[in-house]
Amino acid sequence: MINSECVELEFFGGLPVFTLPGRGFGTMADWPGRVEVPDDVDGWAWRIDCAWWEGPGFLELFEAFIGTVDTEPMTALILGNWVTDQDMDKTAAEMFAPLIAVADRFPNLTALFLGDIAQEHHEISWIHQSDLAPLLRAFPKLTQFGVRGSENLRWEARSYPELRELTFQSGGLPPEVVRAVGACDFPALAELELYLGDSEYFGGSDVEDLAGILDGAGLPNLRYLGLRDDENADLTAAAVAHAPIVARLEILDLSLGTLGDEGAAALLAGQPLTHLKKLDLHHHFISEQMQERLRDALPGVELDLSDPQEEDMDGDEVWRYVAVSE
């Protein structure tokens, strides 16, 4: 699983990441003399990345990359930061259009990540995403796909026979995207990770939106399910407690959200979870007493209850916050 908690990827597709053109890159006049690339192309996940606000734009860098690197043996590619002072408002579709145009030059590509943009470059909610259907259709052999950002994000509900890992990182995943994922057929998918996020940042999914995922009909081989960063984590946990998909999981991940005692009690009152290898609840609002109940009930399960949070009080109102929003 990617599971990077929205920081720049260091490994992807089972490979270490090599970034082009590299930090401190100045102008295109430096390319290719100053930019040294590895000879073992298939030994790296390649990231194209604008290092600074100033300097060459993403499309210029991508053109130089295509003209410099033998992409045929490449198995993993990351489209990183495209935000510069000239390209602040560019959409993901504008950035991946040149990749689609040369898709035949990536015959072995099986892992692709779109929008690996760190917070110091751009807040996750500011990333202008797009309809991903053209990109996924251009690379039908992908076994791993990840995307960061959710503004204007669209996902095509269809069969994805090759995908084995799918990740959506966002401050708020649009409910229509969640429903579309639940309507898909993923015969080989083993790992599914959704940052559901906050309704203030394009999220707002409820249990009904998750129904297609939780019934598991299109996910016969799923082993890891991450319903992370969820502002409705207690309600989600109550639905998960009785969801058919849980019986086939090895790892259940409800971390980074607003899970409290109500959701934890629902998990304990639902179907047995003792078959799980891991239950990840870190960044939570669960009391120490309820944490102890979870430990006692799941002695053979790796249980992550790290990073407990404190609720904020505003008069009579109680506020909990997800880990990733803006």
Image (cartoon, grey):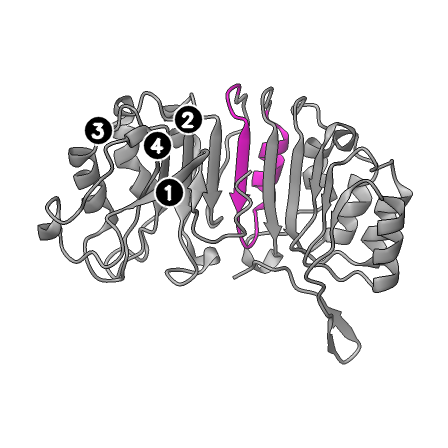
Which residue is painted at 40% across and 46% down in the image? 115
The residue that disc 1 covers is: 17
Q: Residue furthest bottom?
A: 315
The residue that disc 4 covers is: 43
Q: Secondary structure at mark 4?
A: helix
Name the front one of labels 1 and 2: 1
Name the front one of labels 2 and 3: 3
Which residue is painted at 29% across and 33% down in the image? 99
In primary-sequence order, the first of circles 4 and 1 is 1
Mark 4 and mark 3 in contact? Answer it, CB < 8 Å.
no
Mark 4 and mark 1 in contact? Answer it, CB < 8 Å.
no
What is the distance, in whole Å, between disc 1 and disc 2 at their CAs?
15 Å
Q: Amino acid at mark 4?
A: Gly
The residue that disc 2 covers is: 110
Q: Amino acid at mark 3?
A: Asp
Q: In the displayed structure, does residue 276 sit left or right of residue 271?
A: left
The residue that disc 3 covers is: 70
In primary-sequence order, the first of circles 4 and 2 is 4
What is the distance, in whole Å, between disc 4 and disc 3 at their CAs?
13 Å
Q: Which residues are magenta?
A: 161-184
Q: Is residue 153 visible?
A: no
What is the distance, in whole Å, between disc 3 and disc 1 at their CAs?
16 Å
